[in-house]
Amino acid sequence: MPLKIAFTSLFILWATVSYSQLNQTAGRKVATDNPLKSKLDSLVDKSVRTYFSNTSGVGLSIGMVKNGKTYFYNYGETANGNGVLPTNKTIYEIGSLTKTFTGILLAQAVLDKKIKLDDDIRKYLKEPYPNLEYNGTPIRVVDLSNHTARVTRIFLNFFMQAGYDSTNPYLHYSKEMLYQGFHAMKMDTLPGKKHSYSNMGVGLLGYILEDVYTQDYFTLISTFILRPIKMNDTKIDISHVRDLAKAHNAQKEVVPFWDMPSMPACGALRSNTADMIKYIYANNEDATKGIALSHKLTFGTDKDGLGLNWFILTTPEGYRVLNHRGSTGGSRSSFQCFPDQQAGFVLLTNSIANQYQLEKELASITTR
């Protein structure tokens, strides 16, 4: 694209048995709590059935805001073969959707006069980095946020970490290695001119924000975003979560969630559709000054541009879209807000089945 509450086992079993229906999809049965009582229910169900024609699909949860009303739909299983239907409280990893929280946090830091978007990032680094400029033009803070800093998506030393595990690749990547990667990086063109997505850039942005506030990342987003919006289930630590949508590879084998102890700003958050619906409302309404500022265009155009870690588009019908996706080793997520229509949807899955067509159809259903 250029663009916790843990339910008891008894309740989960009761919800699965009492509220699920079985849909025949591509020769297999897929459990759902979709009541199939309205046109909206049927449209969503038809699109999800197509999604499950990909046999690597395991489970998914949808939260939708349409015409001022909230809808939730759940399909499949929280783990392949366990027979447990996810709910709107089931926790998924949301991957790079985390970056939108980082963008809002950056906006808050600007409002708090802790930082300026046009600042040279080296103002906030403890060592000299003469390489972080091109022809005398430095990387600015805003360039890290809208992915125009020309920072490599993944540094080479990422694959040199001791104990590297491709199924949980960020687990042992340290803060020190990230800074070493920036020392070794070579600029190839002027920053602020070309879009090039970078996890490393947002990882550094997270550390800059921690430093200016002298608080850790999760404390900061809890203070400025999660608590004000009452997103009580969104977290990084899931060690005590029981209602969890386990991640799966293409063979539908359970794989680890991606742990990012040293790169939380990139993609460490886990959430559910109940919380992410609150996030839709908050972004549609510009519920805080930080949220509102994060939506301001910083690169490109309103038709196809970026804010602070937000992709910003305009539909052919003229509606503004705020969106982001997330992708990890065994989960996928999609998030779209339509502020002009006070509408939006979130799609969370626990497999790597391609969700793009479903995402496109949900966008159409939400806005029609």
Image (spheres, rainbow, N blue to C red):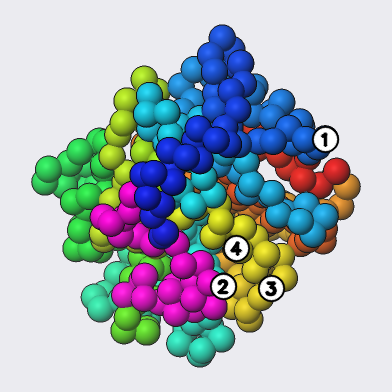
Mark 3: which amino acid? Answer: Asp
Q: In this view, does 289 lie to the left or right of 84?
A: right
Q: What is the quadrant of residue 82 in the picture?
A: top left
Foreground tag (2 vs 1): 1
Q: Where is residue 267 in the image (x, y as percent from the top left)?
A: 40, 54
What is the spatial separation of the Cα atoms under label 4 and label 2, in whole angstroms? 7 Å
Mark 2: which amino acid? Answer: Ile
State yes or no: discs 4 and 2 in contact (Cβ < 8 Å): yes
State yes or no: discs 1 and 4 in contact (Cβ < 8 Å): no
Residue drawn 39% across and 54% down? Answer: 6
Image mark for residue 299: none
Q: What stretch is highlighted in magenta?
A: 216-242
Residue drawn 85% across and 43% down? Answer: 368
Q: Name the residue under label 2.
A: 229
Tag 2: Cα neighbours inside 10 Å, few (<14), some, or many (≥20)? some
Q: Name the residue under label 1.
A: 39
Is residue 133 positioned above or below 32 on the image? below
Q: Earlier in the sequence, mark 1 or mark 4?
A: 1
Q: Is residue 27 visible?
A: yes
